[in-house]
Image (cartoon, helix red, strand yellow):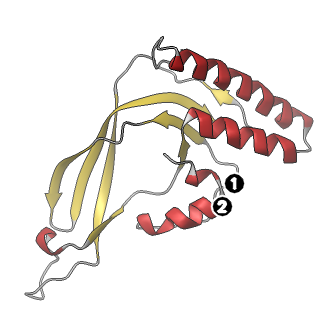
Amino acid sequence: MQGALLSPEGWKKATPLFERAIQYPDNSKITIMWTPRVIGEDWIKGNRAQVESKWIDYYGTIDGKLQYQRPETCDVAVVRLYDLIASNAESKTGGAKKASNVVGWKLAWQMERAATIEQVIDYLTQRRETIRDPVIKRNASRSIVSLQKLLKSVKRGRGASAC
């Protein structure tokens, strides 16, 4: 939620958190969300685990052409599940890895770009300055205006909905 996944440098820095690292996806979708960073443990089974973050505010996405897409459904409480796999695990018996011996966990799913409204506005502003394509530049400008309006609404307490 610090916006690291919006830049190649941040992506590289976050790579150790994931089981499978992939190359920075320059034109991939960006999920716009905010989470209170409340993580609850669902289960641990051997070297696998699942945790969840509740009450995520989901605001939509930015596509590869820098167009803002509102969420399809609104006013829905979002829960995000994270599958984890043990890393640096040791077994004293030489058998299967046990959760009690786990030193750390890695996210088992593929990396995706995600950030808060403010971070996406900053990202779009920076990208708009380097883009030559007038259509994509216009998309970035329109998306910035939409997200600034959304941000004002959220900050005024009208609710977290992007609808």
Q: For numbered disc 1, what is the local secondary structure?
A: loop
Q: Residue at horizontal 23%, vertical 78%?
A: 89
Q: Which residue is mark 1?
A: 26
Amino acid tagged 1: Asp
Q: Which residue is mark 2?
A: 8
Residue placed most toward the observer, 63 or 131: 131
Q: Relative to 70, is 20 above or below?
A: below
Q: Residue at horizontal 24%, vertical 52%?
A: 50
Q: Residue at horizontal 46%, vertical 20%?
A: 160
Instruction: Residue 147 in the image: state x and y as whole percent.
Output: 65, 25
* In the image, farthest residue toward the front: 156
Amino acid tagged 2: Pro
Instruction: Residue 148 in the image: state x and y as whole percent.
Output: 66, 23
Give the side of residue 1 with respect to residue 8, left or right.
left
Would residue 90 be seen by someone viewing this image from the given angle? yes
Q: Relative to 26, is 151 above or below?
A: above
